[in-house]
Amino acid sequence: NAGVTQTPKFRVLKTGQSMTLLCAQDMNHEYMYWYRQDPGMGLRLIHYSVGEGTTAKGEVPDGYNVSRLKKQNFLLGLESAAPSQTSVYFCASSTGYPPKNIQYFGAGTRLSVL
Amino acid sequence: GIQVEQSPPDLILQEGANSTLRCNFSDSVNNLQWFHQNPWGQLINLFYIPSGTKQNGRLSATTVATERYSLLYISSSQTTDSGVYFCAGDSGGSNYKLTFGKGTLLTVNP
């Protein structure tokens, strides 16, 4: 009963380094989302995907790239990390089919950029 | 896009007390959901409630879509209810992008 799994759980980067966050879901969901959560800001959408091979920008996409080569995986990349990208990152997935489009979340990745 | 306002931002209760959390939307929303983020950071979906009233144990939620608000009721609160409560909705379309409020931080003291 894995649901949505995020790896890694924690990471520390130096400014300018790159990394990839992996999100995997085993619920055969079409839609997947990446959010970031900053203190007092709630969750903000970075990028999302409505199906395998598709990606689109959310509210705060700058500095991030994504790929959805397989339906079950959604990757978030930081090409050149900046201190402003220190945050907690959440992945979510949903069926995408109305009327019940509930989003299910992973446990989060805590990223610090020094 | 839509704006989501949650109130109160912070709430401290004694165990056993009842509370009401509110969520206002700037425009009509679809797929309205309530989430609980526990102190370890995990986000759990509590309710999918685009309209009407639902109950799950000590929690219930009511959405009045025509007036663009939703309420989350917590009765007989327990320390395990502590955490942040978020509401979120999308403005329509086929991408189902949720916009989240900033949350209500609930602390339940024993």
Image: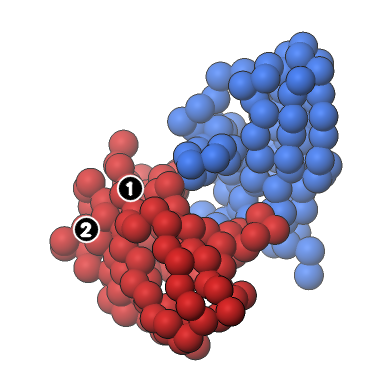
Residue B2 drawn at (x, y percent): 30, 42
Which chain's residue wears label 2?
B
Residue B36 drawn at (x, y percent): 54, 64
Element assignment for label 2:
loop
In the foreground, A44 or A47: A44
Residue B106 placement, left or right of A93: left
Query: Which residue does the image show at 73% across and 40% down from the upper left?
Result: A110
Q: Vertically, is B1 above or below B52?
A: above
Query: Which residue does the image show at 51% across and 37% down from the upper left?
Result: A45
Q: Is residue A29 visible?
A: no
Q: Colour of chain B?
A: red
Which part of the image, by quadrant, shows the C terminus of chain A?
Answer: top right
Query: Which residue does the image show at 42% across and 63% down from the upper left?
Result: B11
Q: How is the image coloured?
A: by chain
Q: Is residue A62 visible?
A: yes
Q: Colour of chain A?
A: blue
Kindly identify the amino acid type of the residue bearing the numbered disc 1. Answer: Val
Marking on residue B68: 2
Q: Earlier in the sequence, mark 2 or mark 1?
A: 1
Query: Which residue does the image show at 65% across and 60% down from the upper left?
Result: B39
Q: Which residue is mark 1?
A: B4
In the foreground, B106 or A76: B106
